[in-house]
């Protein structure tokens, strides 16, 4: 029974699956931080650009002529 336990503990120590999962978690967290920072910094600029384009694209009202 003791050898079964020691073999199990040796396999757990040699397993690197946990380390790769932690690395993926850190990468996902860093990507999320970069996205949040980019959106917060560029958000106001993009709003202004889209409003400017929307103002230029919106249809102009044709003058009405009285009969």
Image (spheres, rainbow, N blue to C red):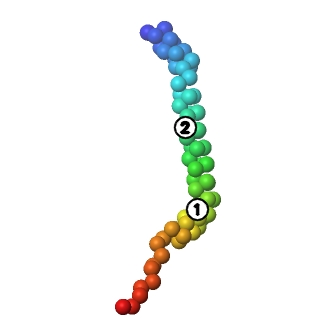
Residue 25's mark?
A: 2
Q: How many marks?
A: 2
Label 1: how many residues lie within 10 Å, few (<14), some (14-19) or many (20+)?
few
Q: Residue at x 57, y 69 (%)?
A: 52
Q: Nearer the viewer, residue 56 or 36?
A: 56
- The residue lying toward the viewer, choosing from 24 and 54, is 54
Give how far across and how far down residue 30 sits, in percent: 60, 43
Secondary structure found at label 2: helix
64 and 13: which one is in front? Answer: 64
Circle nearer the viewer, 1 or 2: 1
Q: CA distance from mark 1 to mark 2?
A: 30 Å
Q: Which residue is pictured at 46% across the width and 10% down the height? A: 4
Residue at the far front: name it.
67
Identity of the residue drawn at 41% across and 88% down: 65
Q: Is residue 47 visible?
A: no
Question: Under tag 1, what secondary structure?
Answer: helix
Q: Which mark is residue 46?
A: 1
Percent position (x, y) of residue 21?
A: 53, 31
Quadrant where the N terminus sits is top left
Where does residue 7 sit, x and y in percent of width and height? 50, 11
Q: What residue is at 56 percent from the left and 47 percent from the top?
A: 32
Quarter residue 26 falls in: top right
What number is the disc on residue 61? Answer: none
- Residue 26 drawn above or below residue 63: above
């Amino acid at each position: 029974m003791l050898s079964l336990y020691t073999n199990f503990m040796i396999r757990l120590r040699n397993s690197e699956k946990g380390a790769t999962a932690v690395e993926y978690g850190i990468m996902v967290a860093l990507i999320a931080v970069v996205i949040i920072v980019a959106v917060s910094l560029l958000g106001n600029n993009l709003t202004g650009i889209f409003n400017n384009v929307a103002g230029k694209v919106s249809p102009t009202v044709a003058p009405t002529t009285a009969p």
